[in-house]
Image (cartoon, rainbow, N blue to C red):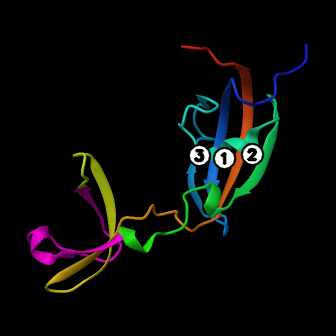
Amino acid sequence: MEQLPIGPGTQVTLNFALMLEDQTEIDSNFDQSPVTFSVGDGNVLAGFERHLFGLTAGEEREFAVPPEDGFGQPNPNNVQTVKRSSFGPEELSEGLVCSFADAEGGELPGVITSFDDKWVTVDFNHPLAGRTILFKVKIHNVVVAEVH
């Protein structure tokens, strides 16, 4: 029986590793159980998904996803200056990740890039914005996705 290739309407089970261009590993599930997702369900980056198209169970691949297909380019409008007094007495440091409430009441992480006695500069861009991401995958299973 011919193996089903990954594409729209398929459900994929795989292991993955996510790395920076210098091979620094950011995330990996190779030492855990594989994950399963349906193509197009929004659970993985579309730029990552497209690289999987045509692969079948048993295949392994490595590929690069540029910023435009990954986490985007940094947006200067996502860097905000906030009054130091809104942080309270907590100790601040550059690189500290803080959680802020967004307009809908959800959580929005921001990274402190600089601060003084009066102002704190916070970068709300995704930490991987502007970075080319390297992926390594091992495909375990490809089946027709269940329609709900």
Please provide percent x and percent y for residue 4: 82, 22
In screen coordinates, is 102 left or right of 11? left
What residue is disc 1 on? 48
Tell me where residue 118 appears, x and y as whole percent.
14, 84
Q: Which kind of residue does numbered mark 3 sit on?
A: Leu
Q: Which residue is mark 3?
A: 45
Residue closer to the observer: 30 or 61: 61
- Which amino acid does the dot numbered 1 rest on? Phe
Residue at image point 38% right, 68% down: 78
**Is residue 80 found inside the magenta-colored segment of the image?**
yes
Q: CA distance from mark 3 to mark 1?
A: 5 Å
Pointer 1 local density, CA inside 10 Å: few below 14, some 14–19, many at least 20: some
**Magenta part of the chain:** 79-100
Picture residue at 45% right of the left edge, 61% below the top: 126
Q: Amino acid at mark 2?
A: His
Q: Secondary structure at mark 1?
A: helix
Do the residues bearing badges 3 and 1 touch, measured as CB atoms within 8 Å? yes
State which quadrant residue 11 falls in.
Answer: top right
Q: Secondary structure at mark 3?
A: loop
Characterize the local packing of mark 3: few (<14), some (14-19) or many (20 or more) Cα atoms within 10 angstroms: some
Dots 3 and 2: beta carbons under 8 Å? no
Quadrant where the image shows the N terminus = top right
Using the image as rendered, state which of residue 13 and residue 104 is in the foreground.
104
Residue shown at 26% from the left, 57% from the top: 99
Task: Establish if 99 lies above or below 47.
Answer: below
Q: Do residues under tags 2 and 1 come within 8 Å of each other at their CB atoms?
A: yes
The image shows residue 19 at horizontal and vertical percentages of 63, 58
Residues at marks 3 and 2, CA–CA distance in whole angstroms: 10 Å
Left or right for 96, reference 68: left
Give the residue pinned by disc 2.
51
